[in-house]
Image: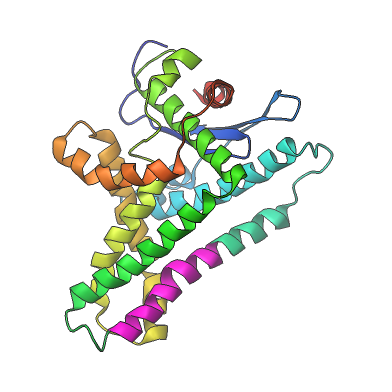
């Protein structure tokens, strides 16, 4: 590989259990190392809904669609990686398990990042007259919960390994974006922190939500929860466009300043990978580019 891809040509991925999933164009590939140290693959063609239906690919709409698609695809890949890593070759994934995992993940996220902050908002609103300040305080509570969750994962050995694979994924994507041949030595030169990472996206969501939710006024608890759920597509749509923009124009100084908090947050969610973990990420990337 010697030529840089077009800036509009985007590749990305996700860390798995002892592996990496990569997605580019209409291809998805998961590469997972089994207990015998062999790399096992799961490949498939997948045309995103944003490409199948033009209206879903419009700016500020495509972000929400892509978010839900990648959550669903990511859970399926995680299930595959768990089976391979645990050497449960005979057990095939069931459709209802994927659906149930998706529903549980979404429900937990709604509870901790919408319901709990909304509860504190209703308790604080009688003491804080300034609406923007009130929303900033609620945003700080939301961010605090998120940081506590991330920090708690650092105590789990398995999650620390996932974060190493996350670093391998970022390094490999960086190498591909710079037109480098995908070798371990080339990939090792790049950073583990990528501006288009999902961790940075979540931080963008939290910042954008402060501004958007400030428009809601001071509704009671249940109304605020309902309004925030309804406005989720708006928040995710704006955040998606912002993260794409920062990814394309990372050489601009003010963009680097805007991306800095998300990159710092990735110090928690990425770790320097080992050579064999980079090999897995490269193997997944080569299947899709």
Q: Is residue 16 left or right of residue 128?
A: right
The majority secondary structure of the magenta stretch comes to helix
Assess whether residue 120 is covered by the magenta stretch.
Answer: yes
Give the image location of residue 236, x and y in percent.
Answer: 36, 57
Assess whether residue 236 is covered by the magenta stretch.
Answer: no
Q: Is residue 136 left or right of residue 235?
A: left
Residue at 41% of width from left, 55% of height from top?
64
Q: Is residue 31 left or right of residue 113?
A: right
Give the image location of residue 251, x and y in percent.
Answer: 20, 30
In the image, farthest residue toward the right: 90
Give the image location of residue 216, x and y in percent.
Answer: 27, 77
Q: Is residue 113 visible?
A: yes
Residue at 18% of width from left, 84% of height from top?
129
Q: Is residue 183 visible?
A: no
Query: Hey, which quadrant is residue 209 in on the image?
Result: bottom left
Q: Which residues are magenta?
A: 106-124
Residue at 39% of width from left, 41% of height from top?
267
Give the image location of residue 221, x and y in percent.
Answer: 39, 85
């Amino acid at each position: 590989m010697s030529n840089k891809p077009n800036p509009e040509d985007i590749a990305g991925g996700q860390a798995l259990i002892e592996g990496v999933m990569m997605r580019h164009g209409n291809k998805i590939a998961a590469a997972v190392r089994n207990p015998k140290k062999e790399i096992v693959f799961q490949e498939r063609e997948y045309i995103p809904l944003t490409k199948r239906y033009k209206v879903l690919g419009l700016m500020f709409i495509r972000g929400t669609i892509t978010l839900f698609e990648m959550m669903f695809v990511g859970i399926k890949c995680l299930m595959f990686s768990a089976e391979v890593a645990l050497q449960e070759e005979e057990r095939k994934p069931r459709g209802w398990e994927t659906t149930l995992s998706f529903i549980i993940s979404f429900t937990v996220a709604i509870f901790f990042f919408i319901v709990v902050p909304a509860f504190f908002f209703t308790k604080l609103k009688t003491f804080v007259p300034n609406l923007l300040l009130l929303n900033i305080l609620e945003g700080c509570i939301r961010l605090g919960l998120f940081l506590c969750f991330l920090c708690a994962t650092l105590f789990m050995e398995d999650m620390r390994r996932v974060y190493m694979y996350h670093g391998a994924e970022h390094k490999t994507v960086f190498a591909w974006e710079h037109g480098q041949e995908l070798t371990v030595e080339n990939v090792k030169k790049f950073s583990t922190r990528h501006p288009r990472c999902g961790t940075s996206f979540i931080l963008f969501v939290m910042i954008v939500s402060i501004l958007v939710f400030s428009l809601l006024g001071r509704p009671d608890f249940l109304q605020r929860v309902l309004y925030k759920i309804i406005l989720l597509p708006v928040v995710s749509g704006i955040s998606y466009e912002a993260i794409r923009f920062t990814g394309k124009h990372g050489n601009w100084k003010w963009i680097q300043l805007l991306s800095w908090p998300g990159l710092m947050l990735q110090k928690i969610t990425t770790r320097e990978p080992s050579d064999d973990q980079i090999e897995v990420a490269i193997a997944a990337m080569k299947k899709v580019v």
